[in-house]
Amino acid sequence: MINTLTYPLEKFGLTSLERVENALQHLQNGKGILLTDDENRENEGDLIFSAQHMSVRDMAMMIRECSGIVCLCLTNEKADQLELPYMVKENTSSFQTPFTITIEAKNGVTTGVSAADRITTIKSASAINAKASDLARPGHIFPLRSKNNGVLERNGHTEGSVDLMKLAGLKPEAVLCELMNEDGSMAKLDKIISFAEQHDLVVLSIEDIIYYRKFVRDYM
């Protein structure tokens, strides 16, 4: 039986299966998506691109429309390859957001803040043969470590974004940032949907990914 949820995200697919597969196609085509979580959690929408396909233009939009804390979501294997320890020994944040120390590309950047510089850092870190010596610390990109079993282990945007990359057959690194309103407050569902429609993006929820992995198809 296919999950059918009656709520505003139906315009991006009538079921969890449709929304996830629409999102995967968007990502494979180099486009972005918006991922929402539960209203009892952060109740936010993150703008997400694959690190593999993200362009300077995409990054400029992310910096302009989102919180400015641009995060690079990584598998633990990749974070270990880059020798990126957690930012703190004891994580006391509300949702255990798995930040590592921040990074910058050692070569090809100036201040590290521009859209082009941030893309250079992301491409450097997500390269297949990337190594710790390719990166300076600290920097202006905030890596996040995804749990090994993704949204089935932690229902966070970090895990959701990496799961989507794996399901799409892309390199398992994603770039995300929280969508904001013009007044600086965090965007809620109505704004998230209108932004998606304006920019040809797909919106789906973390619950959609959980359903898809449990009942449709998994990457494990």
Image (tube, helix red, strand yellow):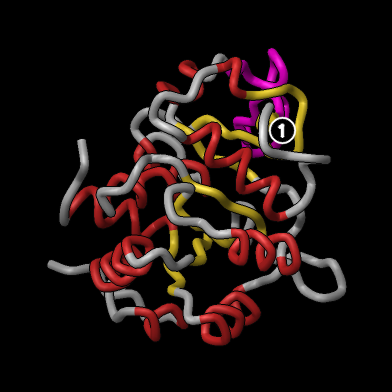
Q: Amino acid at mark 1?
A: Ser
Q: Which quadrant is the N terminus positioned in?
A: bottom left
Magenta region includes residue 149: no
Res 3 → quadrant: bottom left
- Between 72 and 14, the one nearer to me in the picture: 72
Residue at image coords 41%, 43%: 162
* 104 shown above or below 86: below
Q: From this viewpoint, which residue is outermost toward the right? A: 183
Residue at image coords 73%, 48%: 69
Q: Is residue 175 left or right of residue 106?
A: left
Q: From this viewpoint, which residue is outermost toward the front? A: 108
Magenta region includes residue 99: yes
* 207 shown above or below 203: above
- Between 148 and 120, the one nearer to me in the picture: 120
Residue at image coords 33%, 51%: 210
Q: Over which residues does the magenta segment extend?
A: 84-102
Q: Main secondary structure of the magenta part?
A: loop
- Residue at image mark 1: 93
